[in-house]
Image: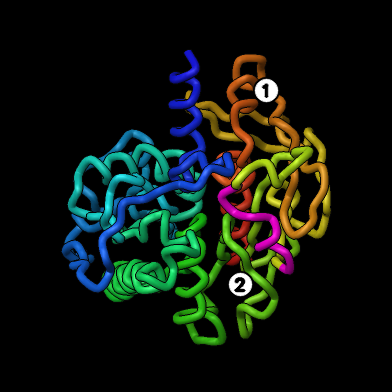
Amino acid sequence: MKFKLTLLLTIFFCSCGLLKESNNEIIYKSINHDQYKAVTSPDYNNLSSWLVHPDHIEKNDFLADNDGKKRADVFFIAPTLFSDKKNPNWNSDIYDEEFKNYLLNSTIKFQATAWKDAGNLYSPNYRQAHFRVFDERYWKIGGEKTLQLAYDDIKAAFMVYMKKYNKGRPIIIAGHSQGAAHAVTLLKDFFDGKDLQDKLIAAYLPGTKITSEDFYDLKLMKDPLDIGGYVTWNTFRILKNYQKYDLTIPLEWLKGGQVSNPILWNDSKTSDYKSHKGLYFINGKVYKNSVKIEYTNYAIFLRMPRVNLFKTILFSFLKDYHKGDINLFWEDIRTNAIARVDSYFNEL
């Protein structure tokens, strides 16, 4: 029974691979980066290099209405799921069908779908940096170069998307964790203070740290109908002793970071249960009025979601809510993204 619960939680909170919640040091296998040959690069002119694309021949049920007929586009960047500590490679292999299916049935199904009703969904399959690159032990011996290679794929995918597929439509940029970090760089390269900024509906950037100094012109949006800027947050469960757990994102690192309210989408530091539109659970159902923001302090802090007894037991096993930055607010994000698209076109 305990194994099944852990498996369900791993699938549901599918954002950064490892349930890294103890202070035991994790030992990874690793290739010397100087001797490492990166896996074959993607070709984004080929649909097989995309996780999600409106022109994909193969359709999953949860992507069946991604038909390319919407008036806006969504460019979604997946988080780190390449985390097997026994895999010595630095970057994931986009031609690994098993890993691709894992991405589709986790981050795409439970995260990216929050935006699919707002626009035509595009998500490149890129050579993700392995989870270990965020460990300081690996950063200077290959992690930095590994993360750059991953971003180079994202940039290449976006350039193909703009040239072949965008056709002048406005854009939502979205990503989580490593994906949000790449999205920040993408916004700097293509949107911030540039002509394309006029086509930006919004950027949703949960699971990373953003400060007011990170952008030249893009601003944190503070109204649910604001457009042309970004929102960002990191989610924590309220705990008595955070030092007891080796959380995916350390609280200390987030100090000085900006935070949005992903329920009310304004300056409010709290929210109540009745305002919560819904979390997306592993059974494919949305549960509303189940999350309340207790307080905000460079991150948002929650108690366990208020759902039925069995599901509450599932949540009780999880101390690190980083994995749920999107799932916990899935319906809130979905309805807000639609509203911002409407707001964009109303201002034309």
Report if residue 248 lies within the magenta region. yes
Asked which quadrant contains residue 161, the reply is bottom left
Q: Which residue is mark 1?
A: 307
Circles 1 and 2: CB atoms closer than 8 Å: no
Alpha carbon of mark 1 to alpha carbon of mark 2: how far? 35 Å
**Element type where label 1 sits in the image:** loop
Of the residues shown, which amino acid type is indicated by label 1? Val
Magenta span covers which residues?
247-256
Percent of width and height locating residue 226: 68, 65
Dominant SS type (magenta): loop
**Element type where label 2 sits in the image:** loop
Compared across the picture, whether 324 is left or right of 125 comes to right
> Which dot, 1 or 2, sits closer to the camera?
1
Applied colour scheme: rainbow
Of the residues shown, which amino acid type is indicated by label 2? Gly
Quarter placement of the C terminus: bottom right
Q: Which residue is mark 2?
A: 228
Report if residue 125 lies within the magenta region. no
As rendered, which of 61 and 109 lies closer to the eye?
Answer: 109
As rendered, which of 39 and 97 lies closer to the eye?
Answer: 39
Asked which quadrant contains residue 210, the reply is bottom right
| Residue in the image at 35% along x and 70% along y | 142
| Residue in the image at 68% along x and 41% along y | 244
